[in-house]
Amino acid sequence: MLSKQEIVTNFILNVEKERVRCNLTQAQMAKKLDMSLSGYKKMISGVTSKIDLYTAYLLQKITGKWIFELIEDFEEDTEMILKLKEMSQSQKNFIKGIIDFEVSFSAPHESREDFITVFVPTGNMEDGMIYDSSHFYKVNAGSYRQKFGDDLYCGIQVTSDHLHPVYNLGDILLICRKGIREGDTGIFLNKETGRAYIRKLHTRASWILEPINGFGKPIVIDTQDEANTQKWIRFGYVLTKMRERD
């Protein structure tokens, strides 16, 4: 939790940063914030420690930044909100659908933690698969929740035979979002191509993404090449597999 002084200091610093970013003079910024120039100068100099709520509201409208960004109060929930800014409208609609689904989930409160969301891709699960779209449903994974606790994040259903014999059609891969380690079978997303790979990670001088069943070629990612490394998202790794009837 931030102290009052930290909130005021951060806000003042960000007012000036945003003024410069918006290419405004202090007089222009003061006018947009419905303040006198002298009042603005008193605020940014710290002469007054009282920030008017309306001033904060106007600054949000001018800059497009939420109040928690302006006072630099970042928590898990607010970090998720920030990621929404990077999404297209269609992506936001998809996320809203997931949120609505989760909120309306009708299982008794005491058993909700036993259920996980399973994503079902509609594209072929071949090497370098592209998910055209996906739908999702809930499945009771209570026994796995007892074993893995909060490490169990979600499930991904296998929708083809391309991963046989390691994973079969209908298997649900239980995913942990923590860092993928040497030897883990991970979900790797290439931001540039939009393709997803289920591969085993080997961390030598480079990342080597090995096919789990001999289908496809190894992918070598030079970890010394930061630009190339940034193209890849290590979404999570497979804890185990389950069948819906388990």
Image: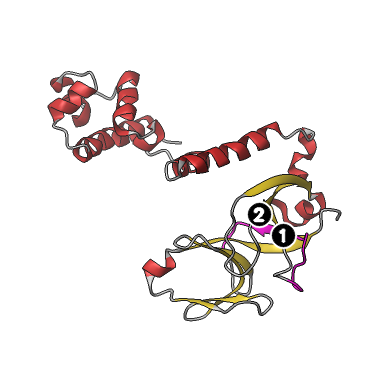
Instruction: Tell me where the magenta segment starts and ends, as one range.
Output: 164-179
Taking the magenta stretch, the answer to whether it contains residue 166 is yes
Local packing at callout 2 (Cα closer than 10 Å; few below 14, some 14-19, many 20+) is some
Q: To which quarter of the image does residue 201 belong?
A: bottom right
Residue drawn at point x = 62 percent, y = 40 percent: 98
Q: Earlier in the sequence, mark 2 or mark 1?
A: 2
Q: Residue 157 vs residue 62: left or right?
A: right
Colour mapping? secondary structure
Q: Mark 2 highlights which residue?
A: 122
21 or 211: nearer the eye?
211
Instruction: State the quadrant of the C terminus.
Output: bottom right
Q: To which quarter of the image does residue 176 belong?
A: bottom right
SS assignment at label 1: loop
* Relative image position of residue 175 (x, y in whole percent): 67, 58
Q: Mark 1 highlights which residue?
A: 159
Give above or below for 30 relative to 183.
above
Going by the numbered disc 2, the residue's amino acid type is: Thr
Local packing at callout 1 (Cα closer than 10 Å; few below 14, some 14-19, many 20+) is some
Going by the numbered disc 1, the residue's amino acid type is: Thr
Give above or below for 123 relative to 79.
below
* Relative image position of residue 19 (x, y in whole percent): 21, 35
Residue drawn at point x = 65 percent, y = 62 percent: 124
| Residue extending farthest right | 245
Q: To which quarter of the image does residue 127 belong?
A: bottom right
Give above or below for 57 relative to 157.
above
Taking the magenta stretch, the answer to whether it contains residue 181 is no
* Relative image position of residue 157 (x, y in whole percent): 72, 57
Q: Main secondary structure of the magenta part?
A: loop
* Relative image position of residue 75 (x, y in whole percent): 48, 41
210 or 74: nearer the eye?
210
